[in-house]
Amino acid sequence: MEKTVHISTKNGPKVPGEPTKTGTSMVDTAASAVQSFAPINQIHQHLCAFHFYAYDMTRQVEAHHFCGHINEDMRQCLIYDGPDANARLIGLEYIVTEKLFMTLPDDEKKLWHTHEWEVKGGFLFMPGVPEAIQRQDLEKVAKTYGKVYHFWQVDKGHDLPIGLPNIMMAVTRDGQLYPEMIKETEKHFGVSMEKERESRAYMKGPDHGIHPLANGGGKGLKLEVREVDIKPVESVPRVFV
Amino acid sequence: MASSDKVPVACPASSGDGKEPMGNPTKTTTAMLDKGTAMMQSMKPIRQMSLHVCSFACYSHDPGRQIEVHIYGHRVNQDFLQCAVYDSNSSKAHLIGIEYIVSEKLFESLSPEEQKLWHSHDYEIQMALLVTPRVPELVAKPELKNLAKSYGKFWCTWQIDRGDKLPLGVPSLMVSPQDVNLGRIKPELVKKRDEEHGISTESLKPSRDGICGPEKKNLVADYWVRFRKGFALDVVETDMKRTAPFP
């Protein structure tokens, strides 16, 4: 096992660039007044949790999910590295019920992770919402599976989203997450995960248990890029006589 | 495993008839709980999104596959936008990916290896393929001029256009419309978009006269145009570096 130290991304690099010019920002203000933001308006929930890289548990990030329901069985979430206006959009997550997860092919299942311990362990919470109300929804989340991609390696100090996407995973047992990272989050949001864990003891994970193929099937997963030839297109139409 | 350029293994979600994602309609109790908790949370990052544009994108490994996209962007500063990409602008829209947009200045600071993954925006803006729904051209012009000189990187995580009812496989790198064979958007796609939004791409074109692309067009971006090669992603199994047993 690797023993490493968590590097906080709280004071991470600022995105390079000039402050937004008045000309541009006025347009944006005019725009937002008249445009329809229906997809964004479906986002009703803020969840804070932790992700680590699917090939490297030693690299862990606090992940702020902003989620909306597509339907009762599925949510789609935008992931930011913080809860504030200056947060960076670093990824996205899809969350499905066990029912939908079980329809996936075996190879697809490996890309998804379970939420049971994230929820029951108290690591996943809804900032600003009283615990008793949070639990009404989180007891459902405990039974779901998620698929996360991060596109911006803020933990590496990248000031721009360079490189390939990364599949991420979530905590499945104690001892995986850095205690100092958890303490920092607890302090910031005024929560106690240990205390909340007791209140969540009644919750259950997926009805059929954690699927053995989920969570990478126990293996690390990494994305690699490959160049492909683009199929040529006939530029001259074929003529049939 | 499910490479971005491969067809998914047959399963209910890949049946190809995907109009609706799989799952039951949202219960009233769920919706009410959602709304109730949303009032207690600040949602600040989401509130920063102030720009909606509609355009088209193509799969980098198969540019003949083209999709309509609705991009909701947060202009972080003069040189950078971070955007959520959806397949429509309705409340039932699917989140299909994320796009980052950088100015020419920031783009030139990237390594050539990185630049290969990015695409230019000038053609789609000059051809009025990219539109700003409900915002008059005159008001949109400064932003359009800015975007026309920018470069984007778009990862698509849900191949809705091939009928996937769940997000299957790994992300696909997307590219922008270009003035070459496969890069020109199919007229029927443009027509459908125009009809749905009550606009006419053709009649918007003249207002885009004089909008210029980057000062110096980068020859590594839009890699497929020059080299006829796209990029696909594969998943590989490897050993996970761990601090504790997993899972």
Image (cartoon, rainbow, N blue to C red):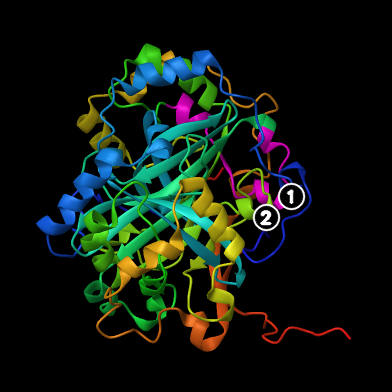
What residue is shown at x 25% (from left), y 39% (from top)? A33
Of helix, strand and loop, which one carries label 1? loop
Give yes or no for contact between labels 1 and 2 (Cβ–Cβ under 8 Å). Answer: yes
Kindly tell me whether residue A202 is visible in this rendering. Answer: no
Mark nearer the N terminus (1 vs 2): 1
Q: Tell me if residue A24 comes above or below residue A231 in the rendering.
A: above
Q: Which residue is mark 1?
A: B16
**Magenta part of the chain:** A100-121
In front of the other: A143 or B166:
B166
In front of the other: A238 or B4:
A238
Checking the image for residue B162, the label placed there is 2
Amino acid type, mark 1? Gly
Query: In terms of image quadrants, where is residue B77?
Result: bottom left
Residue A44 in the image, given as x and y percentages of width and height:
39, 28
Quadrant position of the C terminus of chain A in the picture:
bottom right
Q: Is residue B80 left or right of residue B22?
A: left
Is A82 colored magenta in this rendering? Answer: no
- Residue neighbourhood size for the residue with mark 1, other residues' Cα within 10 Å, grouped as few (<14), some (14–19), many (≥20): some
Residue A88 in the image, given as x and y percentages of width and height:
28, 51
Q: Tell me if residue B218 comes above or below residue B27 in the rendering.
A: below
Residue B103 in the image, given as x and y percentages of width and height:
25, 70
Q: Tell me if residue A238 comes above or below residue B149 in the rendering.
A: below
In front of the other: A10 or B126:
B126
Residue B87 in the image, given as x and y percentages of width and height:
52, 48
Q: Is residue B112 left or right of residue B95?
A: left
Query: In terms of image quadrants, where is residue B222?
Result: bottom left
Of helix, strand and loop, which one carries label 2? helix
Q: Is residue B220 left or right of residue A30?
A: right
Amino acid type, mark 2? Arg
What residue is shown at x 13% (from left), y 64% (from top)? A18
Is A108 colored magenta in this rendering? Answer: yes
Which chain does the numbered disc 1 sit on?
B
